[in-house]
Image (tube, rainbow, N blue to C red):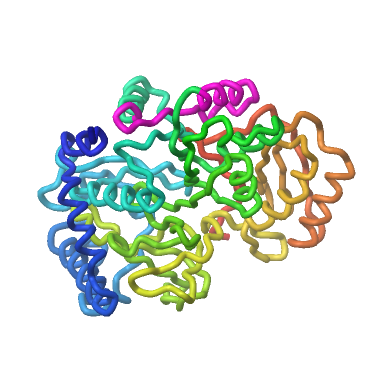
Amino acid sequence: MNLFDISLKLNGFPIKKAIRVLQDIQNVDESYYSEYIASKKQEILKYHLKHNSFYKSFGKQVDIDNWKSVPIMTKKELQQPLKSRLSKGFNENNTYINKTSGSSGDPFIFAKDKFCHALTWAVIQNRFGWFQLNFNSSKQARFYGIPLDKKGYYKERFKDKLSGRYRFSVFDLSDDAFEKHLETFKSKPFDYINGYTSSIVQFAKFLKRKDIVLKTICSTLKAGVVTSEMLFDVDKTLLETQLGVPIINEYGASELDLIAFENPSGKWQVNSETLYVEILDDNNHILPYGEEGRIVITSLYNKAHPFIRYDIGDIGILSKTSSIKMPILEKLTGRTNDIAILPSGKKAAGLTFYYITKSIIEEDGNVKEFVIEQLKPNEFKVLYVSSETLSEEKMKTIISEMENYLEKGLLITFEKQDRLVRSKSGKLKQFTSYLNQNT
């Protein structure tokens, strides 16, 4: 029984129609795909200029025949009552309503019309199908957060039941909790793991300490899908080794869609069916394939709420091998607010030197996880969870490497924690700057 599809249908999301439309899009020949994208861009732009008063005011300088004249939209512009942002004919009762996680620091409530939301699920089901994973029949081990309020909690549990999901807590990453996880994997025929990168990495480290490959105790396991946080190469190797299955990297945004999904060839294939993805420089100029810049996305099918040239807050590169029908995300280097600004004025991607520190700190063997905070231009703090305090020698090595990468004269302190603070959704932010990013 297709419980997942039925639940979508009962909630007014036309999943069968969405699947048919997605197939039609995918059947568009490569030689005509540029025309398809151009027509959908203009169609959604015209729609919101006509039917959405918020966007009509926002895009009053738009030349309908010049895409470059379309203004860049950011999260801050959307932080106003949802009612004022909905298109004519849409309200909170006939749309899908949700809230972003706020990982960028700018959370807001958004809406999708019901067909657009169904199309989102059609894309997700299509991508998981590349690996013989079926939302209606494959059993999922889910490493996600869960709302702590009573209504939100039971709503998610009900959705888990309909979707064949078993949810593991990402708020308790102790060995005692992982021991219980192991028993569950022994007794349930999971097809795949899906969830936050950092939590699944911690489970894999536990498995390594126990010298266990998860596939040997859960033989039905086929794959692992990680999302919402950065996946480093060293962690992917760890996951594939200790879980004993291929690891698939996913990149998405709740307000948009599935943005990119690792295909069976190991390429991070961008969703070109329902989204139009651009890479822009600081002056909003479109960059060619192979150059790094801000990821700006247009939702081609959301009529309830405009996401047109929407700056998602991430930095990345589209591969030179990309085509209009199959763009490939070569690199995702982090969020635009993950930038360290140093006393000299130099800027550095926070996740890059997080990775340098990671390569040293994890040689220790006792450190489970850590985060880095920038408190002042010259002051950084490393918060870590470990069974033992870091040695003076290890601290000096980390300080030396960070200064080599960044600059001399930095004050770097270390603080041992029992556990790291996660967001309400359960995500872990590896680098945080408390500086004003506009300075």
Residue 335 higher or lower than 363, as above or below: below
Q: Which quadrant holds residue 183?
A: top right
Based on the displayed image, in which of its 4 quarters is residue 37 positioned? bottom left
Q: Tell how many labels.
A: 0
- Residue positioned 67% across, 65% down in the render: 345
For residue 313: magenta? no
Which contiguous range is marked in magenta? 160-186
Q: Quadrant of the C terminus?
A: bottom right
Q: Which percent across, then down, holds residue 111?
A: 25, 46
Asked if residue 416 is positioned above or below residue 176 in the image, the reply reads below
Whether 366 is drawn above or below 345: the answer is above
Quadrant position of the N terminus in the picture: top left
**Which residue appears farthest toward the right when viewing the image?**
393
Residue 227 in the figure: left or right of residue 61 = right
| Residue at left offset 23%, top offset 58% | 22
Asked whether, in this view, residue 136 is left or right of residue 293, the answer is left
Q: Is residue 392 left or right of residue 268?
A: right
